[in-house]
Amino acid sequence: MIATILLQASAGGGLGSYGSLVPMVLIIVVFYFFMIRPQVKKQKDQKKYVDELKKGDRVVTTAGIHGRIVDLNDTTFLVEVDNGKIRFDKSAISLDASKALNTPVVEKKA
């Protein structure tokens, strides 16, 4: 009985153990190109944007606070808002919201 099961198992598929490996490799490739790679690119863009900030730039934080940069340090920046100044960590910059704030609006004529 056991010998029959072993013979059937060994004579089963032509690909053997590689047949179950192919779908796993495809799943890993899909995850890399559709999830990991875009996230790494977004992180690089965020770091580049934060490194290029200078005094006078208008920014939006991830908390939604709008202001103008007054002072920059290695890891923090001082933002001037309506009622004073607030110090934030550089990681608190929202790349998408800050770019939208600094992009001029072009009106279409009808």
Image: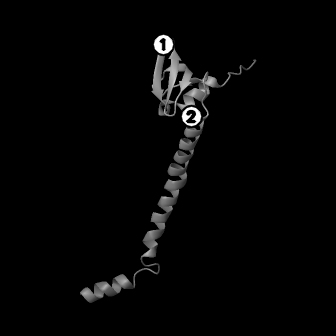
Task: Give the image location of residue 51, x and y in percent.
Answer: 58, 36
Looking at this rendering, what residue extends furthest in the right direction?
109
Vertical order, 102 against 15 (above or below): above
Residue where numbered disc 1 is placed: 84
Give x and y (percent) for residue 1: 24, 87
Residue positioned 37% across, 84% down in the render: 10
Tell me: 10 left or right of 50: left
Secondary structure type for disc 2: helix
Question: Mark 2 belongs to which amino acid?
Answer: Val
Residue 33, above or below 75: below
Mark 1 in CB contact with mark 2 (< 8 angstroms): no
Residue farthest along the front direction in this orientation = 73
* Left or right: 59, with 23 as reference point: right
Question: How packed is label 2: few (under 14 Cα within 10 Å), some, or many (20 or more)?
Answer: some
3 lies above or below 36: below
Point out the residue furthest to the left here. 1
Label 1 or label 2, whichever comes before in sequence order: 2
How many other residues sit within 10 Å of disc 1, few (<14), some (14-19) or many (≥20)? few
Give the number of the disc on residue 50: 2
- Residue 98 image position (x, y, % from top left): 57, 27
Q: CA distance from mark 1 to mark 2?
A: 22 Å
To which quarter of the image does residue 99 belong? top right
Residue at horizontal 71 percent and vertical 22 percent from the top = 106
Q: At 51% across and 34% down in the image, what residue appears?
A: 74
Q: Secondary structure at mark 1?
A: strand
Of the 4 image quadrants, the one containing the C terminus is top right
Query: Which kind of residue does numbered mark 1 sit on?
Result: Gly
Nearest the camera: 63 or 77?
77
> Which residue is drawn at the image coordinates 56% and 31% (left, top)?
96
Q: How many marks?
A: 2
